[in-house]
Image (spheres, grey):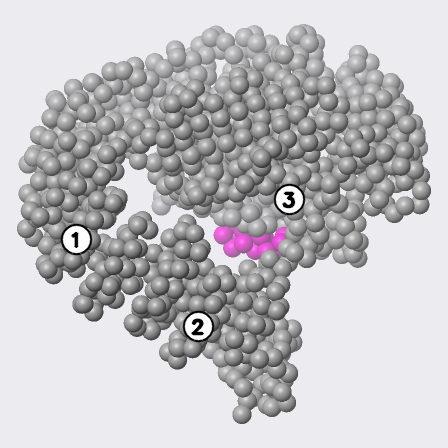
Amino acid sequence: MKKFHLLACLALVAAMTTSASAAKRAPQPGVTLKTSTADQHKLIELLRSNAAPAAKALACKQLALVGDAEAVPALAPLLGSSELAAWSRIALEVIPDTAADDALRGAMGQLQGRLLVGVINSLGVRRDTKAVDSLIARLKDPDADVASAAAVALGHIGTAPSIQALQTAVAAGPKQVRSAAAEGCILCAEAALAQHDAAQAIKLYDLVRGSDLPKTRIVEATRGAILARGSEGIPLLLEQLHSADKASYNLGLRVARELPGREVTDAVAAELPKAAGQRRGMLVMALADRGEARVLPIVLQAAGNGDEEVQILAIRALKRVGDASCAAALLDVVASGSEEVSKAALDVVGGLQGNGVDEQVVKRLAAAPDSSRATLLQLTGRRHIASALPLLWKAADDKNEAVRLAATTALGETADSAELPKLIARLVAAKSETEAASIQRAVAAVCLRTTDRETCTQRVAAALSSAKTSAEKDRILDILATVGGSKALEAVARAAKSSDAELCDSAYRVLGKWNTIDAAPVLLELHKATTVEKYKSRAIRAYIRMARQFTTIPEPQRAEMCRTAMAIAQHDEDKRLILEVCLRYPSNEMLALATEAMKVPGLKDEANVVVLSIARGKVGDATELRKALAQAGHNPVKLEIVKALFGAGANTKDVTTTLRRHAKNYRVIFLPSDNYNEAFGGDPAPGEVKKLTINYRVNGKSGEVSLSENATVVLPLPR
Amino acid sequence: MSELKRADRRHFLKSAMSAGAALAVPYFVPGRVLGKNGAVPPSEQIVMGAIGIGGRGTYVLGCFMEQNDVRFVANCDVREERRRGVKNRLAEKYGACEAYRDFRDLLARADIDAVLITTGSNWHTMLAITAAKAGKDMYCEKPCSKNITESIALADTMRRTARVFQGGMQRRSLPQFTFAAELAQQGKLGKLETVYAHPDGLTTKTSSWPQAEPEPPKEQVDWDMFLGTAAWRPYNSHLLSAEFEKGGGMMGGGCLEWGSHCIDLCQWAAKMDDTAPVEYFPIENGQATARYANGLKLVVRNDGWLPLGSCPVRYEGTTGWVETGDSGKLELSSPELLAGKKITEIANYPATFHVRNFLDCVKSRGLTRVNAQVACQSHIVCHAVNIAIFLNRKLSYDPVKNEFIGDDEANRLRGEALRDPWRF
């Protein structure tokens, strides 16, 4: 029994319990608001009362839904409260009445600092044109945060006076406000463009990009300036693409994708011969992203020759934009490129859509020299080209093993069930282990792809009777296990009952790794039927494995499987495996099963741990834990931790306080981590084997225990 | 939203969708740019900062640290204990790491190209937007937004700043979900009629006001920064680890938490990455539903998992169906839908491929699989479903204007004021 495994699981269960408890203690993330049924008058009354801030905050939230002009006088005074100002603005920002604007505007003259910034921000959100004069005045506020807020708010409002003021601020305003003023200008430019006023937008963008501003603002304005100009923005776009400055160059690459128009594509394409190395590759990618069919020849040309890095980037771009017209050129690259380039091209041709691609691949395969046959065979398989089957069969007999292997793999990806007998027959004729393994995979692949899997597995199973060597039988059974299904299972079960010892062994081997739960009753039947001890053990272990590893089976079914296994298992070793399943999938049924197992002398220790673990996992259920502890032989005691030391040699630390904190009225102590170093706040003796020594008293009697590192803390009853 | 802006959005997304259809092979940097023994020269490395690394963040950070063209130089957390722990982890691998309490100090560093954002979801949108404005690319965990307004602000900002954004919906980078989506997209299931998402929970709630506890020193826990854009409430230690503001102090529940994955997958399969359903229905018989303009039905079930693992989706067309989940396995109406293909089974939804896609796009400046526009639309659907459940009535939605039609209450729930001094 892997006791350490059980203990690790125990600690995991404990850790999960801890975090679940913590989540339980945390406050609920929210409350549910009333909607249209909320009484506005009561909410207003509450805001005017001496109610606690919490109640007022919630009232503001409700008024955000149902408040109107009537609520504004009650909300406005809160704008001066550092605790409730934002709550008040939550309502004021959305109340569809000019009274809310009046209140926010009125508050501007009374507030300063952050609260004033908040109010200005809300005026911007509401686009209050009546606030423009006050906001323009605030552009000169000595508090740069206030002035910046005013600039952005003016940008949102965007009236002619706002724009004028922002332009002035960008050109000649205080330096710390210029960036926000530029942001305001860019917002106004966007609005102008949306209103089809490109001239105004260009004017604003150009002003910003020509001013003394942080680079980020310049980049934003340059983008806008290019896009607003349309095709006339091409020179400015090219300027960015030529730039040695990283931010400008990056902007160029982005806008080269964004700016629409054939002439833009032409201009960017014309840059290709001038660009070198990675910059050329980046341009190819940008061109490909423009999504125009006519860029294909350009990308293809880059994919075909030149700098290898550019070639690869271009080929990858074709994965997104390529079509059947690219097939010939890419096949040339497959044949002639370096290993890296050829591989990239192969990947793209493998997924190319459109007519004619398959025909071209087959034509090339038929005439391929030895050097490229394996690659083309691989491609044929990836594309599942049925018309290439004669060529594939021929290549499967080639004198070159690499070609034979590639052909076999391709057959697996291409052949249908009718070809299966022919493929199975090759298992016998395989020239090497490698080839036999390849054929095995190919047969399984055909079975898995077909819509009539059961017919296929019948054909594979039929081959079992004619298989001569144990290796052949092994391979056929492995195929059946990989493919699965009822016919495969029947065939393997028959083999398990065979008088052929080797076949029988192989059958039990594959049943031990069967992938579907339908093998469970078969294993029970085999366990019952066989008189051979080793097969009985293998059958029950395979059965228990299913209960352990199949996570999706319903819990009652799993518990029933464990109960059945416990009843028929003959060895404690097997029963311990069942206990491990109980631990992994805790439930009341599993708890009951483990509790019963405690009566078996050889299982008592492990069953004990499982019972405690499951009980511990019942979050917050102290009654359940006490019950389980009692069942496990742990009755409540009066426990005192006298002293506890953790470490090795002279390097020990006193962990008495920590241990006391976790000790309850039982002789089992659950620590918050299965790792003593973590539970006790650090490693007192790195690299050394440590012990935890505890002096304690149980019901007044003194005891001492020394535990190996990370063991479950169980205190023996003092004598 | 204006028509012109809408058209601009559509054009932008066209590239994203083409990238999405080619998931099997992401952009990548060929091995030859790597130095000897796979080491990447500093000039080719992406310098990163990690923000808000908790439970999920620890895992995602690990996925990034597996990549040899990434170097973390900084981390940030409002909690001193985590700040120190992550700093030590990063310093051990990269030699040095600076830890910050305020993310704005991290974003101010010119040497940082990109950030990993795995804070509580209350912060995701604001952090992503602030990072973009500071010129950083970002991988941002989901849920990416708290409401419809935030979703739109996120997409607009990423477009405006030309930053690379990857939402943490990593299932778009996994083979079984890709194959299922492609079957639907390529018409292999016939005309698509119903898509199913299983977010395991459809409860909607609003934020609470916890019991006050003594506030620790700012250096230990910066409560003000923890609250971020959320309206003020007193310090409570449990909120640090509980699901705080999952729904942005307005709405929440499973639909957003897991819907940002499985509803996102449905949007993708249905080729609806640039729009959202036009009608939403409250829960009936354990499931909420929505209908797209073309008649396609989205079913959001609340009755547990199918046997294919967590986060399952099912796509039904006139001639066939496909179903898959986190087990990595696929169920099909006919094995012929496989067309001989063998789909690699990858269980337990690893994020490695998704992380790689992000890093490749940081270099190429292409669109990630879950770019901001994709994330925006998926989250809008989640929020709209939540609002219909919350109000318990049918809602009509205009996905161009991003407005509920004729329902003032629903429209009020599209966004929420941000606490000072935060703004989009």
Q: Is residue B343 rendered magenta in the image?
A: no
Q: Is residue B360 visible in the rendered structure shown here?
A: no
Residue position marked by numbered label 1 in the rendering? A494
The three-letter code of the residue at mark 1 reads Arg
* Span highlighted in magenta in the image: B82-98
Residue A546: quarter of image: bottom left
Q: Around disc 1, counting alpha carbons within 10 Å, would you say few (fewer than 14), some (14 to 19), or many (20 or more)?
A: some
Chain of residue at mark 2: A
Q: Are marks 2 and 1 in contact (CB under 8 Å)?
A: no
Residue position marked by numbered label 2 in the rendering? A596
Element at label 3? loop
Nearer to us in this view, A500 or B111: A500
Q: Is residue B384 left or right of residue A541?
A: right
Residue position marked by numbered label 3 in the rendering? B120
Please tell me how many numbered marks the rendered image carries.
3
Horizontal and vertical percent position of residue A564: 35, 63
